[in-house]
Image (cartoon, coloured by chain):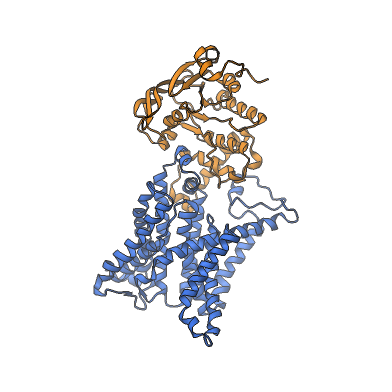
Chain colours: A orange, B blue
Amino acid sequence: MGTAAGMKQGDELLALSDVHMHFGKVAALSGINLTIRKGEIHSVIGPNGAGKTVMMNIINGLYRPQKGTIRFKGKRINTLKPHARAKLGIARTFQKVEVFGGMTVLDNIRLGRHVHYRSGILSGAVYLGRAKKEEIEHRAFIEEEIIDLLEIEQIRHKPVGMLPYGLQKRVELGRALALEPELLILDEPLAGLNLEEVEDMARFILDINEEKRWRVTCLLVEHDMGVVMDLSNRVFVLNFGNMIMDGTPEAVQNHPEVIKAYLGEEDLYATRA
Amino acid sequence: MSTTWLPCGVYHETYAQDHAWWQTRFICGKMVLLAVLLFGVIPFFADSYELSVCNQIGYTILGALGVQLLIGFCGQITLGHAAFLAVGAYTSTLLILEFPWPAWMMQWGLAYPISIVAAAIVAGLWSVLFGLPSARVKGFYLILTTMAAQFITVDFIITQYISQIGGRGQAFSLPPGTIKVGPWVIDSDLKVYFMMIVLVIGCVTVLANLLRSRAGRAWVAIRDNDVSAEVMGINVVKYKLLAFFVAGFIGGIAGAFWISNLAAVSPEHFPWFWSLWLVGVILIGGVGSIHGAIFGSIFMVAIMELLQLAVMPLADSFPKLLMDFLFIKEAAFGLAICMFMIFEPNGLAYRWWQGKNYFNLWPFSY
């Protein structure tokens, strides 16, 4: 599961070419080119308002760019609705947690598997046979693969709206993982977390990227430079809708324009001790 | 509301156990008692008036379930649900009175059951039609479009056109003996009661099953956060319309059921106030819970009947009370909603849930 037939590590998974997006007269993105390769963690950094979240919204279909193409696994997906892109294997988490507050943790994660459920409304209404069997199969998957990975056993029956922020972020990650995505968009997964939670979350991201079971390609938007430089294979730097550079973390750290626009002269991006 | 806590010492070893509805022997026993009460005690010990109150409650539950699905589970605020009840009632009535049923079908009493199914489907589709604006609008705007459903359906189409069928122009009278289910002619409160119980249990079961399977989760997700529901792969428009269909379907069953209790069907049975009333029922019972629809219906109907009992003896000395009873009723409705909004905004179902947890966890507080 997870890996598309015939795709190897390092093949092009997602490509944006010459993407323009403007709201009225404000140009949010002007001519972005980005290629994400299978199996990598590709980060996007940039100052506030640079257009990072707009880029994420374009990739999963909440916005439609005025110009340019988006290709996922070689197929043009410009006109697909977000739910159709989810079926193709694009999942995301949000900058401000967007969980289903009234549902339990388990139901949130079950909902992430929506595209994998097959039972229709009629078999759901009688809840015999396929619908019942399917619920148990998916429950087993969720318990063994996701709840166990994210260490949220003790809260599985709690409504998510009542959980602290850090756990909500974890549940949101679990929900995105339940989709068994090929590309996982993580929009500031570490924002608002304390140091211990940041370390946990960074470990989860590495796990889902590196473990044979998952091997999920990640697109990471983050402001915590220590984590970005440690985790990423490549870093894409955005400023006012323009690309400054796209390269390895080392190259980005030494690029004079990046330092000027974003990182600052001081040693902020040093790895956390 | 989340799942209820299990009593200390109850463990599950399979997922099937954890997915079951009734997870302890105590709950199974409770449900058996409820069944005995509903099928064995009430029908044989209640008099005709009490049975008619029960039927009124059942009708309110069937109506409120659809509203609960739309408002409580899918977040689509509706103020026109009586329209779908009316569509159900009229479809069923017209089918019974006008459709050329073969003689054997009439003899076997199939006409009315078939007409209930047809009424449910027609009301469901009619509901989808007025659910279409929900693809674009939500919140206050949706309230207005669903109110339009009420006025277009009941006040315009049914009053002006449907009522003219057969040249009567007013109400459709249902001659005794036309409402027949199998071998039974539904002509007494007791028979209506049994039909009501079967339909309520059926609809509650179907709705509860839907809510624990794929479609139901999608609805709740749309209620809680429609953007992330879309991003997680839910076709939001499709599931909203599906919710309207199921709500209309149950509403159609409610309307078609209610004609068994009526001597004649007229548009006045489905006023806009009834739509509002159903919303009040779920607010008092608890939004977002099936228990809520049931408790709210029991509470509202019981309060109104008690009010009537209280007014009757006073009427001798204050005849005006009787004259103004309709207004007293509406004032009581408004007052009840105000009190609940202030003192228990989560409704009766929340209190019920708290009580269950209290006894399951006793003697500990958590």
Quarter of the image where one finds residue B168: bottom left
* As drawn, B91 above or below A37: below
Outermost right residue: B363
Q: Residue at x 44, y 49 (%)?
A: A121
Count of numbered tags: 0
**Is residue B101 at all visible to an observer of this figure?**
no
Q: Position of residue B211 (x, y in %)?
A: 50, 51
**Is residue B85 at all visible to an observer of this figure?**
yes
Is residue B97 toward the left or the right of residue B251 in the image? left
Quarter of the image where one finds residue A141: top right
Q: Residue at x 61, y 19 (%)?
A: A268
Q: Position of residue A49 (x, y in %)?
A: 48, 28
Is residue B134 toward the left or the right of residue A103 in the image? left
Q: Position of residue A236 (x, y in %)?
A: 48, 20
Q: Position of residue A86 (x, y in %)?
A: 44, 34
Outermost left residue: B167
* As drawn, B100 above or below B289: below
Q: Camera-side residue: A36 or A9?
A: A36
